[in-house]
Amino acid sequence: MKVINEYKVHDRMLIAVDCIILGFDGKDLKALLIKRGFEPGLGKWSLMGGFVNTKESIHDGASRILEMLTGLTNIYMEQLYCFGDVDRDPGDRVISIAYFALIKLDDYKAELMKEHNAKWFNIRHIPSMIFDHKKMILMAKESLRQKVATHPIGFELLPEKFTLAQLQNLYETIYETTFDKRNFLRKILSLDILRKLTEKEKFLSKRGSFYYTFDYDKYKKLQREGLKFI
C-alpha cells in the first residue's frame, strides 16, 4: 500500500513579516514608510518588511527585519495580526504577520533613511500604500490606544528624560483628544512610577519644567496588583 506524505500534497505559501514602526516627534505620532524598490508596487509607499527564512521563527524574522532596516535591537515590538486574504499580494500567495514597533525618532539614523528611501508620515495623514499596508497601520493605531491604557509602552516613544507636558502631549496625540491637565497629572503622579530629576527643560520658558524618568521596577509591582494606567 502506497503511503501518502500529507505535507507534500498541500499547497506551499510564502510567509512575510511587515513592520509598522511608530515614532513620536513631540507633536505628532508618525509611521515610518519606505518607497517600494521592486514590483509589484514599484515606487509606491510600503511598510518595512521581508520574508521569513525557513530556519527562523516568526518573531526572530521580525527582529531580523527590524534590525536590518532600522539598525536597532531590543526595541519594543508586538505581534499585531495575521493578514491572509488570498489576493492580498498580486506577486504570489503571501501570508503576512504584522508587528508594530515603537522607537524614538532620534534613534533612527539619517543614513538609513536615505538608504531605504524612508520617510516619517503623520499617522493621521498616511498616503496611498501597496496591498493592505494602510489597513495594518490603522489596526496598529487602535491596538496602541488599547495597550497604553494599561501598559506604559508609551514611554518607548519618549526621550529617556521628559517633562510632564511632553508626557501628556503624547497621550493626547495617541487618543486624538485633550485631557484636563490637573486630572491627568494627578492620575500619573498618584501611580508613583515616575522619578523626578533636579534638571529642568528651559527652552520653552525661563522658569523651566522638571524632567522625569520612568521607574520600571515600581510599575512592575503595580502591574501585579492590578493597574489601569490611563
Image (spheres, helix red, strand yellow):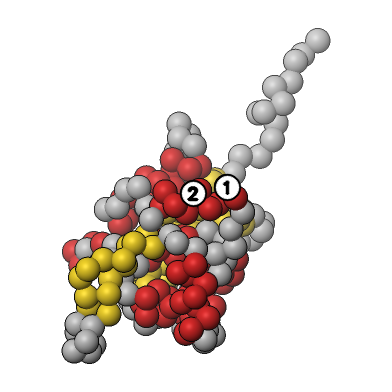
Residue 227 higher or lower than 138, as above or below:
above
Disc 1 residue type?
Answer: Arg
The answer to which of 45 and 194 lies nearer the viewer is: 194
Instruction: Please identify the quadrant where the C terminus is shown.
Output: bottom right
Q: Secondary structure at mark 2?
A: helix
Where is residue 118 shown, x and y percent of the image? 31, 69
Residue 162 higher or lower than 27, as above or below:
above
Q: Is residue 143 visible?
A: no
Q: Quadrant of residue 197?
A: bottom left
Where is residue 104 shown, x and y percent of the image? 32, 65
Residue 209 higher or lower than 197, as above or below:
below
Within 10 angstroms of label 1, few (less than 14), some, or many (20 or more) residues? Answer: few
Circle number at residue 220: 2
Q: Residue at x 18, y 89 (%)?
A: 206
Residue contact between numbered discs 1 and 2, judged by CB atoms under 8 Å: yes
Q: Residue at x 49, y 75 (%)?
A: 186
Q: Residue at x 55, y 64 (%)?
A: 229
The answer to which of 19 and 168 lies nearer the viewer is: 168
Within 10 angstroms of label 2, few (less than 14), some, or many (20 or more) residues? Answer: some
Q: In the visual, does 76 lie left or right of 222?
A: left
Disc 2 residue type?
Answer: Lys
Where is residue 49 shown, x and y percent of the image? 43, 56
The answer to which of 135 and 99 lies nearer the viewer is: 99
Q: Is residue 166 visible?
A: yes
Circle number at residue 224: 1
Where is residue 156 shown, x and y percent of the image? 39, 61
